[in-house]
Amino acid sequence: MSTAPSAPVTADAVASVLDAVDAGLDASLDRLFALLAIPSVSTDPAFHADCVRAAEWLCTELTGLGFEARVHPTTGKPMVLAHYTPEGPAAERPRLLFYGHYDVQPADPLELWETGPFEPRLKEVAPGRRQIVARGAVDDKGQLMTFVEACRAWIATHGALPCPVTVFFEGEEESGSPSLMPFLDSHRDALAADVGLICDTAMWDRDTPAITVMLRGLVGEEVTVQAADRDLHSGVFGNAARNPNHVLGRIVGDLFDDQGRVQVPGFYDGVEDAPGEIREQWAALDFDPAAFLGTVDLSVPAGEADRSVLEQVWSRPTAEVNGMIGGYTGDGFKTVIPAEARAKISFRLVAGQDPEAVRAGFRRFVRERLPADCTARFDEHGGSPATVVDIANPFLTTARAQLTAEFEREAVLIGSGGSIPIAGAFKDVLGIDSLLIGFGLDDDRMHSPNEKYELSSFHHGTRFWARFLAANAG
Amino acid sequence: MSTAPSAPVTADAVASVLDAVDAGLDASLDRLFALLAIPSVSTDPAFHADCVRAAEWLCTELTGLGFEARVHPTTGKPMVLAHYTPEGPAAERPRLLFYGHYDVQPADPLELWETGPFEPRLKEVAPGRRQIVARGAVDDKGQLMTFVEACRAWIATHGALPCPVTVFFEGEEESGSPSLMPFLDSHRDALAADVGLICDTAMWDRDTPAITVMLRGLVGEEVTVQAADRDLHSGVFGNAARNPNHVLGRIVGDLFDDQGRVQVPGFYDGVEDAPGEIREQWAALDFDPAAFLGTVDLSVPAGEADRSVLEQVWSRPTAEVNGMIGGYTGDGFKTVIPAEARAKISFRLVAGQDPEAVRAGFRRFVRERLPADCTARFDEHGGSPATVVDIANPFLTTARAQLTAEFEREAVLIGSGGSIPIAGAFKDVLGIDSLLIGFGLDDDRMHSPNEKYELSSFHHGTRFWARFLAANAG
């Protein structure tokens, strides 16, 4: 391979790569379409061979770029692991670990797709606005290909990448990633890097990029309150026999005060607000809480009364009762006192909270509310701490600068809606922070029929990574 | 028919009837067994013809005794209505309306029966203690036949009954009695009487008879709390979106204070304690709350802290959450904020409470606890007031005296475990009070396999009714 440009990379060197991205866009789309045409649905065994085919396709592409790439079989879907080490000083730059997933959601209901989910096409929805339509367009093939194509443009223009890069693709993200943790554990050395890059998120809006800098942790608890050893007839025992529905109702009712604060003692210990810079940025956003809630026919925020909606959703911890059941719930009526009632409760954690302390605090809270004759059984459903990227992290600083350069607008630093386990896994197992930078939009219909990815997202995303590679080079 | 003994009936006249009951016990059992052998299961259409057969069997028996008896078809199961009017002064005595039901519960699970559910037999469980084992033995064929056989003994001994009697049997008690109210409504004249007699309850214990003098009313309410217009992902909306599980939990948790008192304003308006005489009797009973609760692995009464367990179960009003559900309740976890949560709540009423006032009070209570964005939908599931027999009722006085005569022990005046709609129906439609006097025992395995009725219950029960008929004659 040729020698990479000497660090720091000149503006001209970057500009040539960006020109190559622009010139090669159609060919990039052709390659993306080839990947999109492979129905790599991981949840359905009928598509196992297609998943393997998608992994091999990516391996072949990366090998063609000069990566040392391998497909690693697992008991589930194979991993793709590829390494690129440039020669010369570039080899000393921080190594980037880029993650994506090649598996996609099932396509059904098929009848709601305008065109075949695995027949990718470019659709012009308005003058100058085109979208890539296929299952996987945004989640995650379009996104992961922005990085691959940025690497391609670098290598085509300068013969080499300007820094070390590892590319890691899994094929089970849509099906719970059962093979992920064991693989990370047994391939720590092969996955060693200085920072993770995860391209699986969205922009703030079509013109404004975003970096997800905080992911709330999650503690799941199922509590079952038990009293009598069997369901009872409420005529015979009513009033005298303890009713677990009442006990559970009291527990749930006590969880919050009227100001929306969680009442589990110690819950907020160690919790700090998001950094002032971030909160100011959020306050300045054109975010309309009423419109946000209005999309689901709500109007008044239900969280902590002294926090903004964005803080409530992104940077404050909370508890949610996701499910609750006790007694007879079918049609009609049955005058029964149930033997038990249960609730599934999830706690979203922020930095500073320890999942096991939160779990212990909740269990104490419940036990204090158990009257005589009642016992509680607890079943845990996972516990993971929050993941936070320090606002002073140099890679974050680099990314912000390059996003501004590409989009001519400051990136918004946001919290995450869903949980993104790979970021926590990289932190826990590999000890590295991750930047979550993606170019999806809220209306991409992810997981739905007619999933799309803006062509502008694919284009700008590729250009951004090209800039980022350069900036990481020095 | 012969002339009945002139009122008042002499002790000797009664004694001869009792002798006839004793002498005819085996033949009475044969007749009861014939009725028990008919599988008159009302909930299963496959047994419709057997239900009709049972009705006709009873009609034939009553006709043979001298009643004017008819089977009345309905859109469901037929009613049996039979009238006996003696000649002479006996015709002026109060008319007794005896109620029973000839339909029985389904027998399954069949494999748990020691012998066929419709192959009645006499089982000796201890020296001198024998039980009638069959489906319907206690509920209700054995019980209703105590009255029929008492009438038979009277007529066999003296040629006539000593007072007017109407016998009314339905065939849908185990399946919600859909034909009952329309039939009562359209046969008020045919059912006119001075008091109802309902033989479908239990004794206090094997040696102690009981009369049920209070039946709590029932108000059923299903409340559905709704917030967003769809289930929400708690990562995206959590903390900001109202969660109906939390709102419902608060409502349920607020229903009672720590002393077990219902917190719906006005709930206890008009509620009075049971008469002092009754409460004293209950306090003197050999009732062990711990043993009662211990049968279902409980130990501490959950009701109003300043009332005894018997008062809690029989004479105090209450609320019970019979069912509660909201969100994801299947296996595993799903981080969802449900669009709605609902609860089925039943209120047991005592004398002085108006069902519609209780319903209105509860709805007000709920609405006061609905935050912004939440609505509540209410579905009613029935409302009936309490039924109470005035302790000064002369028929009650008569029954108490005759139970003491037969059992050589005072009858306990008790409240009811389950709801017995016929008593309220007789009051509402016919304007008469009813005495609920039965000879079942708590261990009869009603509604279960190997249902039984003590032979001593059948025997003493028949003798009691013979005495009661006499006492009613003057």
Image: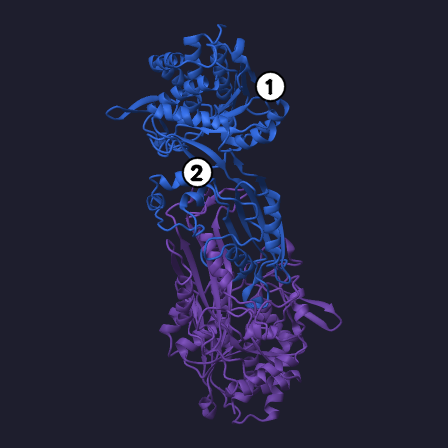
Chain colours: A purple, B blue
**Residue A284 against residue B367 in the figure, above or below:** below
Confirm whether residue B42 shows in the render. no
Q: Nearer the viewer, residue B99 or B115?
A: B99
Residue A338 appears left or right of A310: left
Residues packed near mark 1 inside 10 Å, few (<14), some (14 to 19) or many (20 plus): few
Q: Nearer the viewer, mark 2 or mark 1?
A: 2
Q: Which of A272 and B159 is in front in this view?
A: B159
Residue B109, label in figure: none
From the top left corner, tell me how far across and down residue A356 is, in percent.
39, 70
Identity of the residue furthest to the left in this view: B127
Residue A453 appears left or right of B5: right
From the top left corner, tell me how far across and down residue B121 is, in percent.
33, 21
Q: What residue type is labelled 2?
A: Ile
Residue at which label 1 appears: B190
Q: Which residue is drawn at 43% across and 36% down?
A: B414
Residue at which label 2 appears: B278
Q: Nearer the viewer, residue B463 or A170?
A: B463
From the top left corner, tell me how far across and down residue B139 is, in percent.
43, 28
Element carrying mark 1: loop
Label 2 vs label 1: CA separation? 35 Å
Residue contact at pointers 2 and 1, CB within 8 angstroms:
no
